[in-house]
Amino acid sequence: MMDVLRQARNKSTLAVVISILLLIGGCDRIDHWLAKNKPVQQKEHVIAKPKSQSAATLPDFTTLVEQQGPAVVNIQATRLDDQIGADGASTEGHSLPDNDPFYDYFKRMLPNIPQTPQTEDDEYNFGSGFIVSKDGYILTNAHVVSGLNHIKVLLNDKREYQARLIGADGQSDIALLKIDADHLPVVQTGDPKQLKVGEWVAAIGAPFGFDNSVTSGIVSAKGRSLPDANYTPFIQTDVAINPGNSGGPLFNLRGEVVGINSQIYSRSGGFMGISFAIPIDVAMNVARQLLHNGKVQRGRLGVVIQEVNYDLARAFGLDRASGALISQVIDSGPAAKAGLHIGDIVQSINGEEINNSSDLPVMVGLLTPGSKIALSVWRQSKAQQIPVVLDDVNNNSQTVNTALTTPAAVPFTGASFSVAKLGLTLQPVANGLMIRRVSGAALKSGLRRGDIILAFGAQMIHTAEDVQNLLANMGTNIPLLIKRGNNTLYVAVVES
C-alpha cells in the first residue's frame, strides 16, 4: 500500500499543457462555512439518481457534475527561486520534457507551447482541490503542496490565481490554501458516518492533468487504517483515482462532499481498483485548527493497542471481538495517571463504541489536549468506567514502561522447564520467561522461539511457580503478553 499520487510526478509537467480549462468552487466565508457546514444528512436532496426504479440501472451523475463541478480546482505547485531568464521572462512555469511520451503529440496539436526552463521532479507537483468559502479558501492534500513555494490554482472559467498556504498537516494529509477572489460558488458537505458500504460515490478532479474528469464507483469499506495514518479512518472506494486526483472531492449521490481523495493502492503506479479518501469531517476539523491556530493539536491517551480477535475475545471473557486491547502503557502518560492497565480492553469513549482497535486513536486524535473523557474498560471480566484527561500527542517526553523492555543480550536467571499443557519449554530471564522450544497449541497460536512471555492475562510472570498458579485458574483460552523484538502484543493460546 503506498501513496503513488506523489510518486507519479514524472508525468506532472503534462498538467501545464492539458490543464487550460479548470474548475472553480467555493462556499461561504470559511469561519462561517466551518461552523455552518457540519455534516447533515439531507434525505430529500438527491441530485444523482437512477433513471428508473430498476435496481440494475446505474445512477445518473450529470446533475451532480453540473452543480458541483464548478467547485473543483486544479492545483500546480512548484519550487522556484523567482529568477528572471536571459530573455527577461520569468522562469516560473514548465514545459514537457523532450523524452515525455506525450511531447510529440502535444507539439503537433499545440505547436505554440511555450518552452520554459524545466524543474526537477521534486520541484513540481500537481493535483486537485475544492473551494470551501466564497472568498477563496481551498482544501487539498498536504502532499500536493509539500515543500513547494509557488502554488497556482486554475479555475473552470480559465482564471488563474497564486495561492497562499495557510497551513498543512502531514499526519492527516490536509492543506488549506487561500486565493484572492470572491463570490465563488459553494459545495455542500455531507456526513461520512452516514455512508454505507456499497453506496455510489463520484470523484471530480484532474488525473494526469485532464481537468474536469469525473469517475464513479461504490464505497468498498469504511474506517480503513493505513500505515503512518493513525488519525484518519479512510473511506475505501473503487472509484478510479490516479495521479492528479489528489486533493479532489468525493461526492455522495446528494452532491455532498464526503471525502478528499488522497491515496491509492497500486503495484503499477496507476489505478488498480482500490483508492482511499479522507472523511470530510476529519478534514474540516483540521482546516478549522489550521485557520485559527496555524497547527493541529490532537489528544493523546498514552497507550499501545492491538486488535481483539476471536480467540483473544474468548480468552478475556468477551462475547464478541471488539474494542482496543492495551498491550503497553506509557510512563506518566494520561492512561497511566488514570490507572489503565496492560490487558484492559477499551470498549467505548464518551459512550461511542469502539468496534475496531483503529477506532481508538482516531477518536482520541479528534479531541483537544486537556479534554476529559469517560472510558468504558473491560477488566477482569467486567466493565468499568474510568475518567481520563488527555494530553498532547506531540508530548514525547514519556517512554514505554521500562519493565517491558528487553536488553540487547538477555541473561538467563534460572533453569528451563516445560509446560506440556501449552507445548512450551521456558527459561527465566530478567523480565519474564523466554520460549526455548514451542510445539502443540503454542505453535498453532503463532508463538515463536525467542519470544519472551511477560504476563498471563494482566499478571506478570517470572517463575515456573507463577505459571502453575495462573494456569490452575484459567480456562482453555489463555492470553499471553509477549515481547517480540521491540514490540509487545497479546497472543491467545487455545488448548487442544
Image (spheres, helix red, strand yellow):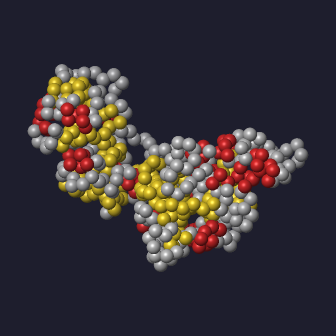
| Left or right: where 114 falls relative to 74 | right
Q: Quadrant of the C terminus?
A: top left
Image: 270 above or below 221: above
Residue in the image at 61% along x and 72% along y: 67
Q: Position of residue 495 (x, y in %)?
A: 16, 39
The answer to whether 486 appears left or right of 18 in the picture is left
Residue 235 lies left or right of residue 120; in this view the side is left
Residue drawn at 27 percent across, 57 percent down: 376
Residue in the foreground of this view, choosing between 476 and 137: 476
Pick the residue in front: 62 or 344: 62
Q: Residue 392 at x, y = what percent?
A: 44, 50
Q: Is residue 82 visible?
A: no
Name the residue nearer the viewer: 487 or 276.
276
Q: Is residue 315 left or right of residue 206?
A: left
Image point (36%, 39%), residue name: 400
How far from the left and from the top, in percent, is residue 395? 44, 46
Q: Identify the image quadrant of residue 199.
A: bottom left
Q: Nearer the viewer, residue 208 or 148?
A: 208
x, y percentage for residue 206?
64, 57
